[in-house]
Image (cartoon, grey):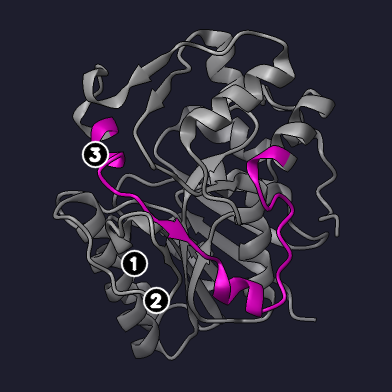
Amino acid sequence: MTQQNIFIFGAGYSGKAFGRDRPQGTRVAGTTRSAGKFAELQAAGIEPFLFDGHLTPEIRAKLAETTQLVVSAAPGADGDPVLDVARDAILHHMPALRWIGYLSTVGVYGDYGGQWIDETAACRPKPGRSQARLDAEQAWHDLGEEVGRPIAILRLSGIYGPGRNAFVNLENGTAKRLIKKDQVFNRIHVDDISGALWHLLEADRGGIYNVTDDEPAPPQDVVSYAAALMGVAPPPEIAFETAQLSPMARSFYGENKRVANTEIRATGYEFRFPNYRTAFDRMWAEGSWRGEGENDKRSPIRQG
């Protein structure tokens, strides 16, 4: 089997989970904007590179031997932070490249009034962040077509896992139970983002995939479930209409949909955590919910 040399633009929370799941013998490199995070990446099995919006000679050299490219960087006011600077390298200086994966968001669908949708649904995002994501998706898709490589676009729902969950929020006093009638959200455990990426990468699969759990649920139910496992009282209910929220937080509640993972299921991927309860039960039983590097101690050889 050909040596896999994978490069991640934006090796953050999801990227580190992906690095920890690498098969034995696979090389993973990734970028961060802070040299202070090098140790975290190295602990996750990722060779770190500093990326400030420009390709250094070291990054160019690494890209020249890259077989699979993962992009986990949100577009900003000036567009996609990777696409413009890496376009020439992808087109002309990455001879080993076989596959590209782009991490996006289910926010590109916009509001569907709580209806079930899948990958066939029309995208009607609000202006701003979600529209920028859809624009970036299209740009990466077009680049994949131009370079003649499959590109997988993974539309993610709300990400959680060790260190990012309702247990942590309950412990630090930031958990809220906001009540908005009929509001639901999908979620995705970070290990299933990693699992889906590896599943698609290893088969060189392109296409659009909703990487999300099977059970869109009211957010207050998730907090209550975590509180019950912890044996603590849940925070009081707060009416959404009177809650003190940032504009960004309030905007999340402006969209309501139930997102199905039809396409990724059709490829044979089996979710490790198909709903929040199975994930919370596992994190609580293992004591892994705080994060604190416990996942960095897992075997670098992917299990299952």
Q: Secondary structure at mark 3?
A: helix
Image spot of residue 117 (x, y percent): 42, 68
Name the residue located 61 percent from the left edge and 56 percent from the top edge: 214
Mark 2 burial class by Cα count in 10 Å: few <14, some 14-19, many 20+: many
> What is the distance, in whole Å, between disc 2 and disc 3 at their CAs?
35 Å
- Residue 180 visible to the viewer: yes
Name the residue located 81 percent from the left edge and 48 percent from the top edge: 300
Q: Quadrant of the N terminus?
A: bottom right
Q: What type is the residue that disc 2 sits on?
A: Ile
Among numbered discs 1 and 3, the one appearing first in the sequence:
1
**Magenta-drawn stretch contains 74:** no
- Residue on which disc 3 sits: 251
- Residue 71 visible to the viewer: no
Q: Which tag is nearer the camera, tag 1 or tag 3?
A: 3
Mark 3 burial class by Cα count in 10 Å: few <14, some 14-19, many 20+: few
Among numbered discs 2 and 3, the one appearing first in the sequence:
2
- Residue on which disc 2 sits: 90
- Residue on which disc 1 sits: 86
Q: Secondary structure at mark 1?
A: helix
Q: Are marks 1 and 2 in contact (CB under 8 Å)?
A: yes
Q: Which residues are magenta?
A: 249-277
Name the residue located 65 percent from the left edge and 47 percent from the top edge: 275
